[in-house]
Image (cartoon, rainbow, N blue to C red):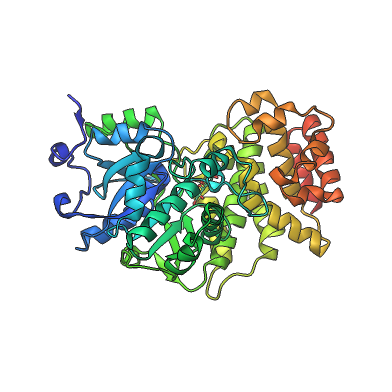
Amino acid sequence: MPVRLSDHSLKDFDLARKPAYDRRDITPGILHIGIGGFHRAHQAVYTEDVLAGGDHRWGIIGASVRSTTMRNRLIAQNFLYTVCTKGADSNEYQVIGAVKDVLTISQHQHQLLDLIASPQIKVITLTITEKGYCLTPSRELDEQHPDIQHDLSNPGSPVSAPGLLATGLKQRMEQGSGPISIISCDNLSGNGRSTQKAVTAIAGLYAGEHAHWIRDHVSFPNTMVDRIVPATSDTDTLRFLQETGIEDNGLVICEPFSQWIIENSFAAERPEWESAGAQIVDDVAAYEQIKLRLLNTTHSALAYLGLLAGYEFIHQAMADPVLSGFSTYLLDKEISPLLQSPGGFDLEHYKRSILERFANPAIHYRTAQVANDGSHKLQQRIYPTIAEHSRRNTDSPGLVLVVAAWLHCLSTAKYASQFSDPAAEIIRTYSGDNLVERVSSETTSFGVIWEDAKFRTQIKDAAAELKQSSVQTLLQRIMVSN
Ligand code: CS2
């Protein structure tokens, strides 16, 4: 008879490491917005270690932006869930006790605003994905975004994360609850500054002294976060039940590797995450650039090229010698020559480790999952490298092909039906031949790189080639001639 994970059944879960503290002693100190798998396998695990170390002030209240699924799943198991860490031939289970409650912006707005304003909450962490910040490609608040329009007209009942923060911080100012740190853990370059921009822009539009208060009392450290956490499938949950006898509807599966680098810029008290392996440094920029441009770029390359080559999972694409050879080519020839690594950082080792991590056969990361939201992701991870090549008058045919592959996938029903992108609708309305010109007429959505005539010609050529030849043939051609 399967047993549902809960405080009560925890004793029956012999295979797992369990919370090393009495959960009743934990008080909430962190509000996390965007409580998906990534947060639960990353920041929550670091926090769990801090709680186990005896500092009980840092329980987590999670919030989902729209869906009530996570709340419903976790509430039935006292907000406990298992992190299953899978190496190529190892399996470890840890039950996390740090989460105390899960709310939903759409249903619990007022409770969430009260939490942002509460003196007990000293840290807000965010994993709301690139698009959740509602910024334009030039990093201004997208005032035309429907959620921002809604929030500007209804500041008392915000639906966007930046709107929620701006209103909650106003309440915090009015209640005199003191300073707070807001920590973005998304793959945006300068993620802290971007968050600050979005939040202060809305606060400024609400008018009053509010934006000044935020400037003086709220810090937005930049961070680099890294751990591969694929979406949990029903098959994963079932297999876990068969292996452990425990039913866990909040199960998260992840790789053994984990890294969190945080800028030392905290406005208030914070958990000692460094005791759990996080690095607190003066400047995150170089680490963040290396991670976005090496790891995330290659991940997106494997996603779009993998989809076109018929691979469901990233590790399957990596098992294709042409696709893995092309990943090495991108890292070595087109990306790393442009990067400055911080002192003591072993770039060669980092590149090899990325490829090993992608190839981990125990981690089933769908190419379609990484393909999601390319219109936002490519701006962070690929366009800056292509733009740098263009400034140096050098070529990056491999990266250009990846962008063409994104556009090809998004404009071809067979592939587009497998993943989502906020630009999907607009791309669908563009007609075939003019696609590149139409995209370039929308630089406010797609980025200024599309204004570059040479880039557009290269994309058109690559797109035409993608229609004629197999992915492998094209990749081999690029690798041979560069
Ligand atoms: C991935 C990232 O889905 C994606 O876009 O590239 O989530 C990636 O797995 C993480 O950034 C790894 O740290």
Side of 109 relative to 291 (left or right)? left
Q: Nearer the viewer, residue 174 or 288?
A: 174
Question: What's the residue at 75%, 46% (across, down)?
Answer: 443
Q: Where is residue 134 in the image (x, y as percent from the top left)?
A: 57, 46
Task: State the quadrant of the C terminus.
Answer: bottom right
As drawn, the residue found furthest toward the front would be 208
One can see residue 82 in this view = yes
Q: Position of residue 372 (x, y in %)?
A: 57, 37
Q: Which of 469 and 447 is in front in this view?
A: 447
Question: What's the residue at 68%, 58% (across, down)?
Answer: 335
Question: What's the residue at 60%, 51% (across, down)?
Answer: 141
Q: Position of residue 27 (x, y in %)?
A: 21, 55
Quarter residue 386 falls in? bottom right
Question: What's the residue at 55%, 51% (across, down)?
Answer: 355
- Determine whether 187 is above or below 289 in the image: above
- Determine whether 76 is above or below 353 in the image: above
Q: Where is residue 415 in the image (x, y as percent from the top left)?
A: 64, 28
Q: Nearer the viewer, residue 131 or 350?
A: 131
Side of 413 relative to 156 (left or right)? right
- Determine whether 247 is above or below 329 in the image: above
Task: State the quadrant of the N terminus.
Answer: top left
Q: Which of 359 and 120 is in front in this view?
A: 120
One can see residue 479 in this view = no
Side of 194 relative to 402 (left or right)? left
